[in-house]
Amino acid sequence: MAYATTHDQKTFYVQGGAGPQTHQNNQFFSLDLTQHSWNTTSPPWKPLSVGAGSTASSPIDFGLAMAISKDNTQLMEWGTRIGFSTYDIETGAWSGTGIGTGPKLGFFGYQAATDPNSGLVYIPSARNNATGMMVYNFVTKTTTLAPMPSAKLLRLPVGKYAWAWNDVRQSMLLHGGANFGNSKAPYFNPNLLEFNPATSKWKRLTTKGQRPPPLVEHCMVSAQGGSRMVVYGGTLQANSTLQGDVYILDVASLTWTKGPQPGSSQFRRNMACTAAGDNLVVWGGQSFNMTFLNTAVFDLRNYQWTSQFILDSSTPITTTAQVDDPTPTQTGDGNSNSSSANSESNARGKTISIIAGVASSLGLLIVGACVWFCLRKRKQLNGAGFSRIQNVNINNKPKRASKRWSGRGPANNLARDPQHQAMSLQHQLFEQERRSQEKSISRSNSEKSDSVQLLSPTTTDNSDTLVGLNSGGVTVSPEEWVRRQRQEVNQERQELALIQMQQIEFQRQIEALKAEVYTR
């Protein structure tokens, strides 16, 4: 089966293949990737003309390579048995050129990729007995030869590889593939190789992360504008060890990420793959017990398989008529779709989009409300509580506690409130400061009224005494006066030390209450 996607990511084409009832067929379908939402039970497949006649019909074969011209107006297919066939997308007409320059019959598993800059199509191992790369020109309908990797990079010939163009690197990437020249010991390519069409040079890319193993019969597509490369499915070796894992390469960092553990329905090989928006779309392919699978979607944003394709949830969903899914082939199977199923599917998609939008809005409102409440709470705690504790003014009485604290709950609850306790301690601290100041003022007034003045000795008074003014003329000796002064100073120092110790203890209790408030 052959498949390709237009360069504008609007249409996905699938042609040919082999199914459970027929060995090979020429069915031809397209999938509209511009619809904003659809369910995997009713994807918008559209049957296309298969033409008529031996040289003017779609190829009847499997394992073909398909590519689309850079202007999205032509489609070409190539295979070792059928040569070239082209399809005019605008007119819906097939034509065959009769070119059949492929390698030996029976060697298949080729893929084609278009360079959107030059419009040339590159098909690795399609020339010179699978050792050369074929280059097809849509304009001239002719082919030329391009080099393949050296023996140090890849053992030739190689088939059943994954091959795709990447817009970010402006190059083509080749992953996996095998050399079946020695059936007893086939070679499986473990590397990711890059081909630059501008220089015709190959190189091995050094990647990191959860790298995919050497695979064959898998697919690789460019996604999200070329910022990601997605590898899916295949087998570890031909016709054995079926895989269902998704590996996503971040192109900027060349880091691989492995998707979630796949379910049994995700194991498949030889399927068709494309990407649109945040969706990896796969169709067909062979699974266990020779069963063929339908359309599936992997959500690249949430890393999960889903039944709903959503291109843009913010855009209204349009409803179009559905047609039959492609017939089961080696890259997929089909099912019948009715208009009622399509309506239900689109309704479900629309409902999901509406619910998602409402949920997102409510989530933003709740988060905003929580942030506002937390900021307001912190501001109230800092402004109404701790600012009074930290900014103690010993010259003024403390402000009364706000109604927010003073008027809440019974007295016993208020007494246990940390902020109220802090304010109470602050009030005690203020009272202690006030009493200290009043005592100091009183002592100063007393000294003014009953102070002892030291008189300097005069030439006429040789007595070694001091006269206390305003004290009834009581005289004291200098030693007694000094002793009294020192006694008063020591007493004041003791009282000041006691006040300072009380202040330190109050401050420690206040800090403890502040910590308790923050903890709450």
Image (cartoon, grey):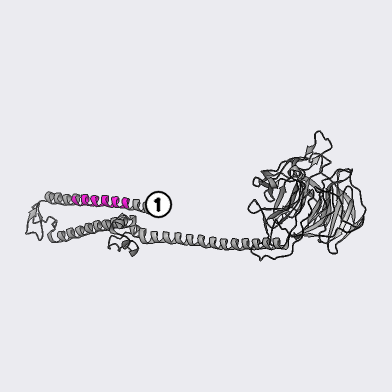
Horizontal and vertical percent for residue 244?
A: 70, 45
* The quadrant where residue 155 appears: top right
Q: In the visual, does 87 lie left or right of 293?
A: right
Q: In the visual, does 378 lie left or right of 21?
A: left
Is 130 one of the magenta-colored residues? no
Is 504 one of the magenta-colored residues? yes
Q: In the visual, does 283 lie left or right of 459?
A: right
In front here: 22 or 193?
Answer: 22
Q: Is residue 254 visible?
A: no
In front here: 345 or 17?
Answer: 345
User: Badge 1 local density, few (<14 within 10 Å), some, or many (20+)?
Assistant: few
- Who's the residue at 71% across and 50% down the image? 230
Q: Which residue is mark 1?
A: 519
In front here: 519 or 342?
Answer: 342
Horizontal and vertical percent for residue 240?
A: 75, 39
User: Could you tell me the amino acid type at mark 1?
Assistant: Thr
- Who's the residue at 27% across and 56% down the image? 429
Residue stretch rendered in magenta on the structure: 491-509
Horizontal and vertical percent for residue 511?
A: 34, 52
State the count of labels: 1
Q: Is residue 185 above or below residue 425?
A: above
State the SS at label 1.
helix
* The quadrant where residue 377 appears: bottom left
In front here: 456 or 191?
Answer: 191
Judged by its main secondary structure, the magenta piece is helix
